[in-house]
Each structure stands twice: as structure tokens, then as C-alpha cells.
């Protein structure tokens, strides 16, 4: 015998059960997931920023090493060191270095280039770019100063970058020094 009311109730129960299975996540579950993601981001973001700073410093150190090698070649060919502009004209460095355009967050500047000495400075564009400013001089020594505000380092000043600190880690290498007055 056919009982329409019972079959109707049975179909409605099945639909109600299937709606619960397809309902998805509750608001509480979503809030918990968002909170966990927020905590992970709060822990990971400072480390990511430090890795970015370290990467910029490492790229700058490598650029200064290359500039030093190019200065040595220029000196061997012309019996004098060259400014960044002269190195760029000779095809030894990219135009961005010579024109004061930021490269990896640093601006390069050659303050002096004579027959017996030169100084190329790498100065951060902003405080948040990295932690250190650098320079390289005729003896190939890369020096740095770790200060809050970006500032060019004069010829021969700053702490020499040791081989241990050459990887760019601010926790290794020579102790930072303030520029001499």
C-alpha cells in the first residue's frame, strides 16, 4: 500500500542529511584556520625579510668583487683606475652602476679614481633595504658599516669584510665600526 506522507517524510530526511554533508566548513572552523595562518605568517615574515636583506647584501658584495676585478683590468690596460662611468664606457660594468640607478637596493658611486687609488661605494637606497653599506678600494678590501641610516663610506673607512663574513651574514666576520670623523 502506498503511504504518501511516510514517503514524503523519508525523502525529506534524506535531503536534510545530504544538505549537512554538503554544508562545508562552519564559521568556527574557518576562523581557526585563519588564526593558524596568521600565526604562521607572523613568525615567518621577519625571517623572510631578513633573508631578503641578506640576499641583497650578498649580491652587493659580489658586485663589488666584480668591480674590483674590472678596476684591476682597467689599471693594467690604462695605467690608472677608472670611475664607474669610465668602466661602463669600456664595457666592463653595466650602465646601471655608472648612472646611479639602484641595483639590488643599492646605489653605486665612484668617489675617486686616480693612477694609484679608487673607491667605489655601495649605499642602500632605504633603511629597509639591508643592514650595511659597503665600499671597495684599490687593495680589493671590501669594507662595511652597519648603521641604521644609509650613508656612503669614505675611502678606507669601515670594517673590512673577512672571508667568514663574506657570505653576507651580519653575525659573522669583523665587528662593525663607525666611520672615522
Image: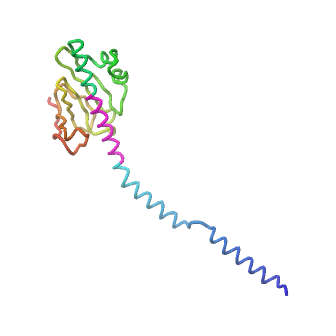
Q: Is residue 30 left or right of residue 84?
A: right
Q: Quadrant of residue 92?
A: top left
Q: Above or below — where is 153 with respect to 129?
A: above
**Residue 50 drawn in magenta:** yes
**Residue 101 drawn in magenta:** no
Q: Quadrant of residue 75?
A: top left
In percent of width and height, residue 155 lies at 18, 25
- Total numbered circles: 0
**Residue located farthest toward the left when viewing the structure as drawn:** 180
Q: Is residue 133 left or right of residue 102?
A: left
Identified at 27% across, 25% down, the residue is: 67
Q: Which residues are magenta?
A: 48-65
Q: Above or below — where is 18 with respect to 123?
A: below
Identified at 62% across, 71% down, the residue is: 21
In percent of width and height, residue 83 lies at 27, 17
**Residue located farthest toward the right when viewing the structure as drawn:** 1
Give the main secondary structure, helix, strand or loop, of the magenta stretch: helix
Q: Nearer the viewer, residue 74 or 174?
A: 74
In percent of width and height, residue 123 lies at 29, 30
> Where does the C terminus fall, quadrant-wise?
top left
Q: Is residue 16 left or right of residue 95?
A: right
Q: Above or below — where is 163 with respect to 107?
A: below
**Residue located farthest toward the top when viewing the structure as drawn:** 78
Amino acid at each position: 500500500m502506498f503511504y504518501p506522507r511516510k514517503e514524503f517524510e523519508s525523502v525529506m530526511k534524506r535531503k536534510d542529511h545530504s544538505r549537512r554533508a554538503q554544508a562545508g566548513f562552519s564559521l568556527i572552523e574557518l576562523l581557526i584556520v585563519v588564526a593558524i595562518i596568521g600565526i604562521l605568517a607572523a613568525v615567518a615574515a621577519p625571517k623572510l625579510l631578513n633573508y631578503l636583506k641578506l640576499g641583497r647584501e650578498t649580491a652587493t658584495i659580489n658586485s663589488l668583487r666584480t668591480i674590483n676585478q674590472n678596476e684591476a683590468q682597467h689599471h693594467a690596460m690604462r695605467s690608472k683606475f677608472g670611475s664607474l662611468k669610465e668602466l661602463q664606457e669600456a664595457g666592463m660594468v653595466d650602465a646601471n652602476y655608472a648612472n646611479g640607478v639602484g641595483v639590488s637596493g643599492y646605489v653605486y658611486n665612484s668617489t675617486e679614481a686616480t693612477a694609484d687609488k679608487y673607491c667605489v661605494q655601495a649605499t642602500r637606497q632605504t633603511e629597509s633595504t639591508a643592514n650595511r653599506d659597503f665600499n671597495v678600494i684599490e687593495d680589493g678590501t671590501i669594507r662595511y658599516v652597519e648603521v641604521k641610516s644609509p650613508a656612503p663610506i669614505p675611502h678606507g673607512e669601515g670594517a673590512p669584510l673577512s672571508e667568514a663574513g663574506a657570505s653576507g651574514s651580519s653575525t659573522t666576520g669583523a665587528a662593525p665600526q663607525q666611520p672615522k670623523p
